[in-house]
Image (tube, rainbow, N blue to C red):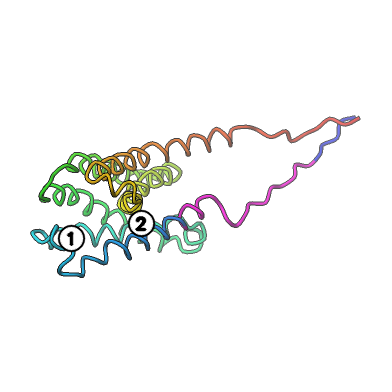
Amino acid sequence: MATAVPTRQIRKSPIQARHVVLGVFILLLVFVVLTREITLLDPNSFLRHRYARIPWLLAAHGIPGAIALLLGIFQFSDRLRKRHLQLHRVLGRIYVGCALISAPLAVAVAAMLPTSSLLMASGVHSAGWILTTATGLYCARTGRIQQHREWMIRSYPLAMVFVVARAIGKIPAIERMGPLGVESVVWTVIATACFLPSFLLAWQALASSRKPVKVRAAA
């Protein structure tokens, strides 16, 4: 006679991979602000002189981009989404609006710089951020919640490019490479942000499709 053996329930760890990724990203964000962006307050700094011609354009790009970076962190909280769904939606709308403002202005900022070596990279990056964010918004508006989550998972890493590229660029060996090192890092981070989320989503779907054995025959 066959008897059914109950499947052992697997308890989820309170600390998941996404929490580690977001924690590391927050540390990188603080590092970039303290080592690079804060120099914008110094009238004699390199960055201040670099953007001296376009201070308002830089602010119009940077402020919405910073808001999108901060809000995106909270949007990945399951607790916030389940307990405060309306707040999650409001923050999501603000994120989308900030992304759609900041992304195209990044191209304008790159075009106005003394050297336009990153203009093409900025265009590709901005187009990807707009496309993924707009697709996520469309999925939410049409009730495709799972697809909405997946496209926003693709969107946020493109927002993270701003921080990750600058943090990697602070590595001494890359700094010594000069403009070539900057361009190499920017293109590499953009490419990674484009393909890595889709790879992880596909791998997660593949792993979840493996059906566990629920019944075991016993004598």
Q: Quadrant of the N terminus?
A: top right
Identify the element where label 2 is drawn. helix
Q: Position of residue 48 (x, y in %)?
A: 16, 63
The residue depicted at 41 percent of the width and 46 percent of the height is 153
- The one nearer the camera, 166 or 110, is 166
Identify the residue position indicated by label 2 in the image. Answer: 92
The residue depicted at 32 percent of the width and 46 percent of the height is 174
> Which residues lie in the magenta part?
6-23
Q: Quadrant of residue 118?
A: top left
Residue 198 is left or right of residue 172, and the answer is: right
Identify the element where label 1 is drawn. helix
Q: Is residue 79 magenta?
A: no
Q: Quadrant of residue 102?
A: bottom left
Query: With respect to residue 79, does 158 lie above or below?
Result: above
**Neighbour tally class for label 1: few under 14, some 14-19, many 20 plus, Cα within 10 Å:** few
Q: Is residue 15 magenta?
A: yes
**Residue type, label 2:** Gly
**Neighbour tally class for label 2: few under 14, some 14-19, many 20 plus, Cα within 10 Å:** some
Identify the residue position indicated by label 1 in the image. Answer: 46
Q: Position of residue 147 (x, y in %)?
A: 42, 41
The residue depicted at 21 percent of the width and 70 percent of the height is 41
Q: Position of residue 62 (x, y in %)?
A: 23, 59
